[in-house]
Amino acid sequence: MRIRSVTTLALALALAPMAFASEARFTFVGKASENNSPVYEEHHAVTGECREGRWRPATHTVEYRKPGASDAFATKSLDYKHSVLRPEMDFRQPEFVETIRVTQANNDSLDIRWQTPAGETESFRTEFDEAVVIDAGFDNLVRRHWERVTADKPVDFRFLAPTRGKHYAFVMEPVSTDKTEAEHTVTIRPSGMVLRFLVDPITLGYDETGALTDYIGLSNIRKSEDGNYTVHIRYEASERPDCELTP
């Protein structure tokens, strides 16, 4: 009887996580335009799981394509194994011979390796804490603070600029704008007075479920060796996880 009880308990414990987590996918396409002219598309595929009714991303791939094309001219892969706010990142844009790779070296520092369009390689070791956000981690930052977003309250954080090997103080705050038809809109801008004059804010739109609908601002895609596109990207989901995106 005791052996049977122990076996039953072990089986229950083994099956317990399966009751609370299931694999899921989140796929969506973003169409980027500059001055109302289409310039490229982003094809996103996010794998993850629904854990206790909430979405938790694991990996994220992006293919950047010219409008109507099937081949990618640039790619990005993200791995959220350490944090949904600080994914490891590998970005490649072969046309400009540029790559950016960000990995977590240990519990408090990041390794950054940037191959520039000029063919040079720059490396940085950057310390971080829980306030630091990397790349698409901003999307999960918005969802993590969904109550503050919907209550029109600001959120302070630090955003990594990988090509500078540093992170800077930023603030995310709700804003009213006629540039999108989104249910909720926020801006991300530097907190410091000097950077505020040098860096234009990014505007993000979200629907009522917490899915990204709009991105307005500087792109990560190069227009030339000297600068990147400034775009309005409109997103549409094709596959959603069967659980809540927000807390």
Image (cartoon, helix red, strand yellow):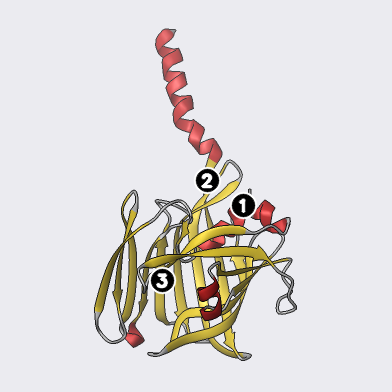
Q: Is residue 223 visible?
A: no
Q: Earlier in the sequence, mark 2 or mark 3?
A: 2
Q: Residue at x 42, y 19 (%)?
A: 7
Query: Residue 112 in the image: x percent, y percent?
Result: 31, 66
Q: Which residue is mark 3?
A: 76
Query: Type of residue at label 3?
Result: Lys
- Is 96 situated left or right of 31 in this image? left
Q: Is residue 21 above or below residue 80?
A: above
Tell me what residue is drawn at x 38 percent, y 65 percent.
89
Residue 202 placement (x, y as % from top left): 58, 74
The front one of 188 and 59 is 188
- The quadrant of the rendering that contains the N terminus is top left
Residue 168 is situated, as x and y percent measured from the top left of the image, at: 46, 66
Q: Which label is found at residue 242?
A: 1
Which of 187 and 219 lies nearest the eye of the viewer? 187
Q: Secondary structure at mark 3?
A: strand
Q: Specify the amino acid type for callout 2.
A: Ser
229 vs 155, nearest the viewer: 155
Residue in the image at 61% along x and 44% along y: 53
Q: Earlier in the sequence, mark 1 or mark 3?
A: 3
Given the current orientation, which residue lies at the most extreme front position?
Answer: 193
Q: Earlier in the sequence, mark 2 or mark 1?
A: 2
The residue indicated by pointer 2 is 22
Callouts 2 and 1 close, C-beta under 8 Å: yes
Q: Is residue 126 visible?
A: yes
Q: What element does badge 2 sit on?
A: strand
| Alpha-carbon span between mark 2 and mark 1 | 9 Å
